[in-house]
Amino acid sequence: MLEVLPIMAFCGLPLIKIFYLSYWQAGWTDTSVPAWEISRYNKARNSLTGKAREKGRFRFSSSAIRSTLFKVYSRLCAVCSHTYAEYIIVPDLQFLVKLPDSIPLSVAAMLPTGALLAMNTVSSVHQHVSNILKVKDTCKILIVGTGGLALWALRIAGHHFINIKNRISITVASLKDEGFTLAKECEKVNVVQWNEDVYEKQLIERTIDACKGKVNIVIDFGTTSRSLHRSLQCLSKGGVVFISSEVAEKLLPKFSRRAEERQQTMKPVDMGSIEQLRQLVDIVGKGEIEPPPHTVFPAEEASEVVKKLCHSEIQGRAILRFHSIE
């Protein structure tokens, strides 16, 4: 839960005070960005005096936001840094997105992170798909990984390309048995399992067979050189592979020459925009996209949850629920 406040001590920028409440009003985070509700703070009148000032925490009443769409107890999500914070300064209220009642906070916690990156990736793919379909009957896409990113990408792609779905062939390269099952459940797609116990050449041949030939586009949510190398082997001449900008700096220098020799292109994808987040909230709120499976854990179990994630013991996305810190 949060409080949006004008803070004169911070050059007039609005300040968000995050409150993670107990059982009936909770804060949820996808291990990076929470979804909140706007709250009142009963000590606002004394915000510039006493302990509040000594701690450097300046709190004001929420009257400044009454003229906007954001009201007390409004449910919000926002794009911010990928770290835990008690306070967040928002340059402008336009960077806050109001949540409809139809979106649970546990689902909202996924939207500004993996879902937004997946949406921007699908949007980036759009023009390349259009160009390919001008000269070919079918566009073949390979999505690598069945974590939260890949599952969101599957659902968003299904919605985004609904009018040309018969001309798009999607194959998922699953990294784990659990992902294999999830991918089969969420969309009618081809699935090939990347079992690391199998020889590299066999995996590449198996993937190309599942795709019925080399693909035109790869969306690689993997983070390793091995994954990207394998993806390029499955990509056709003139094809494009999209990777997260977070790993692009590390991986692109290693493969740029090889990709150039094969006339392939590697494109890094950034986190999406605030406008894309608004669109995402709208289509998820209307039920046009079903969120991937996710499991909610209390924040106290964060260490154990991270261990399970590292060993792929949690299906879908892991969400942490924070209780009151006041």
Image (cartoon, grey):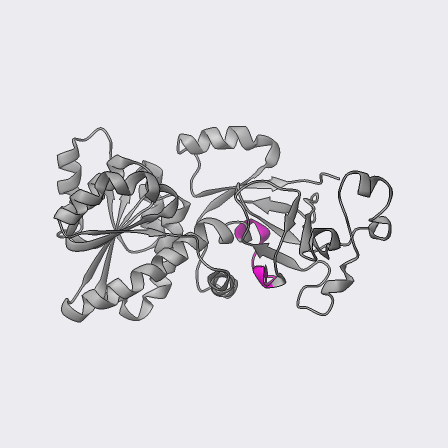
* 105 magenta-colored: yes
- Furthest-front residue in view? 11
**Residue at 48% in and 63% down:** 287
In the rendering, at what x and y percent does residue 291 appear?
A: 46, 54
176 with respect to 43 (left or right): left
In the rendering, at what x and y percent does residue 175 appear?
A: 30, 38
Q: Is residue 294 visible?
A: yes
218 with respect to 79 (left or right): left
In the rendering, at what x and y percent does residue 322 appear?
A: 64, 40
Q: Nearer the viewer, residue 113 or 289?
A: 113
**Residue at 76% in and 41% down:** 56
23 with respect to 314 (left or right): right
Q: In the rendered view of the protein, which quadrant contains the C terminus? A: top right
Residue 117 lies, with reference to residue 168, above or below; the image says above
Residue span colored magenta: 94-107
In the rendering, at what x and y percent does residue 62 appear?
A: 76, 59
**Residue at 63% in and 46% down:** 27
Q: Nearer the viewer, residue 177 or 89?
A: 89
* 14 magenta-colored: no
Q: Is residue 174 visible?
A: no
